[in-house]
Image (cartoon, rainbow, N blue to C red):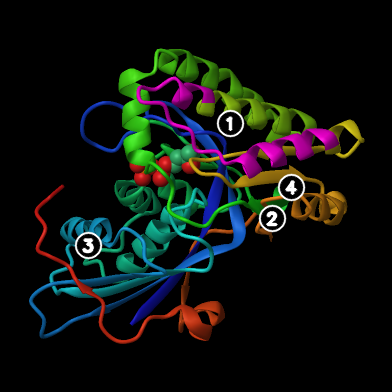
């Protein structure tokens, strides 16, 4: 039995749009920060006498996708025996908290332990993105760039987690599944939003600015550009037909609170993915004050604390948070036999 854990990530320059055609390629380059403590675990073991894989996701995620991914990974990694795979996350699934990124990064890492030939990191990143695009960025720690392409440099670390001890606070404003899954949201945005090309073009300048801000640890530039990039992603999605609105009233209230904090002299900056949660970046010394301010916004259910985190790891046993309650009982969903997706 193998356990692996991987952290979620938050994009400072967003991936919002796949390139048309097969291959799970992004339309543009994104850059993320791997988030310590927002973690998924994957447990994988062989099923020596079984005919099919068995997969489970707890709390429940899109388990059919997980089954297809395990089948595909087995084919690519040369794993002949059926597998039993369980994925668990210690934070809300499918609610715009990037749980699919940490889930597929953890699963990819655990599956690699069963490969016929030890796969390279690049190959594993390419596999992880077939589960969920942003998962390839969770295969590395710290600040990570993902650009289109299949070559070795497609997913690279811009700086390790230790480079910049930022604080990241996640204002949770809803825990249900997101209204429209990212995949469908991206497809709709690319095919119907008149702003999509402009979004991609603007993203190139944001990428250059964020890379430089990371290098020089310039929070004001990083935060200003990340905030603008997130707002442009959502503006582009709002321009889709039918429109995509991922925010709740509390999301807007948190945006206003972050702007109020800035006016009062606290450098705090937000970013928002395809859901109602707001992630706020600030200096560690300001994090208590920012946390209190976010927690007091009506509609904020709780505030999670994070910071730059590391790459996936193999564990000898279940992570402590998984052992204490989120693991389901025996059984799980039998994966139907899947052809290549
Ligand atoms: C808004 O990686 O979940 O979080 O490739 O379809 O699985 P798929 O999409 P996914 O989308 C993430 C979108 C985002 C922005 C980002 O993380 O860059």
Which residue was labeled with disc 1?
230
- Give the residue displayed 55% in from the left and 44% down from the top: 276
Predominant SS along the magenta part: helix
Give the mark nearest the N terminus, 2 or 1: 1
**Which of marks 2 and 4 precedes in the sequence?**
4
Disc 1 and disc 4: Cα gap in Å?
Answer: 21 Å
25 sits to left or right of 173: left
Asked which secondary structure carries label 2, the reply is: loop
Question: Which residue corresponds to mark 3?
Answer: 67
In the image, residue 26 above or below residue 289 = above
Q: Nearer the viewer, mark 4 or mark 3?
A: 3
Q: Mark 4 or mark 1, which is nearer the start of the sequence?
A: 4
On the rendering, which quadrant does ligand 1 occupy?
top left
| Residue labelled with disc 2 | 307
Query: Which residue is drawn at the image coordinates 61% and 51% (left, top)?
Result: 173
Does residue 18 belong to the magenta stretch? no
Compared across the picture, whether 208 is left or right of 166 comes to left
Between marks 2 and 3 in the image, the one whose residue lies nearer the viewer: 3
Instruction: Give the mark nearest the N terminus, 2 or 3.
Output: 3
Q: Which mark is residue 284?
A: none
Give the crowd class for mark 3: few <14, some 14-19, many >=20 residues within 10 Å.
many
Choose top left, top right, bottom left or bottom right for residue 103: bottom left
Q: Which residues are magenta?
A: 235-260
Q: Relative to 119, say whether 261 is above or below.
A: above
Report the disc number at residue 164.
Answer: 4
Work out whether 145 lies above or below 142: above
Cβ of mark 4 under 8 A from ligand 1: no
- Is label 4 in a helix, a strand or a loop? loop
Gap in Å between the C-alphas at discs 2 and 3?
31 Å
* Magenta-colored stretch includes residue 247: yes
Q: Residues within 10 Å of mark 1 (few under 14, many from 20)?
A: many
103 vs 210, left or right, is left
């Amino acid at each position: 039995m193998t356990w692996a854990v991987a952290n979620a990530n938050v994009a400072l320059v967003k991936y919002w749009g796949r390139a048309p055609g097969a291959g799970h390629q992004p339309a543009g380059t994104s850059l993320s920060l791997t988030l310590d403590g927002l973690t998924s675990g994957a447990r994988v073991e062989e099923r020596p006498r079984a005919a099919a894989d068995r997969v489970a996701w707890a709390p429940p995620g899109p388990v059919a996708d997980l089954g297809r991914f395990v089948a595909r990974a087995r084919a690519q990694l040369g794993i002949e025996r059926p597998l039993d795979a369980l994925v668990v996350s210690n934070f809300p699934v499918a609610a715009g908290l990037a749980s699919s990124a940490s889930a597929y990064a953890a699963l990819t890492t655990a599956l690699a332990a069963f490969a016929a030939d030890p796969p390279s990191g690049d190959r594993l990143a390419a596999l992880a993105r077939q589960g969920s695009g942003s998962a390839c960025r969770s295969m590395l720690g710290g600040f990570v760039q993902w650009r289109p392409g299949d070559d070795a440099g497609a997913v690279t670390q811009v700086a390790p987690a230790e480079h910049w001890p930022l604080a990241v606070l996640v204002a949770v404003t809803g825990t249900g599944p997101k209204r429209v899954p990212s995949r469908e949201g991206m497809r709709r945005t690319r095919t119907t939003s008149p702003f999509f090309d402009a979004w991609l073009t603007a993203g190139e300048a944001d990428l250059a600015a964020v890379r430089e801000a990371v290098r020089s640890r310039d929070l004001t530039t990083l935060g200003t550009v990340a905030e603008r990039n997130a707002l442009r992603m959502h503006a582009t999605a709002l321009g889709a037909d039918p429109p995509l609105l991922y925010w709740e009233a509390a999301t807007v209230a948190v945006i206003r609170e972050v702007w109020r904090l800035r006016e009062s002299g606290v450098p705090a900056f937000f970013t928002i993915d395809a859901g109602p949660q707001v992630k706020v970046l600030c200096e560690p010394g300001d994090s208590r004050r920012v946390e209190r301010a976010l927690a007091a916004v009506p509609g904020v259910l709780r505030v999670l604390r994070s910071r730059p985190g590391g790459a996936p790891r193999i564990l000898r046993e279940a992570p402590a948070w998984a052992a204490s309650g989120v693991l389901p009982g025996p059984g799980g969903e039998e994966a139907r036999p899947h052809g290549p997706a």
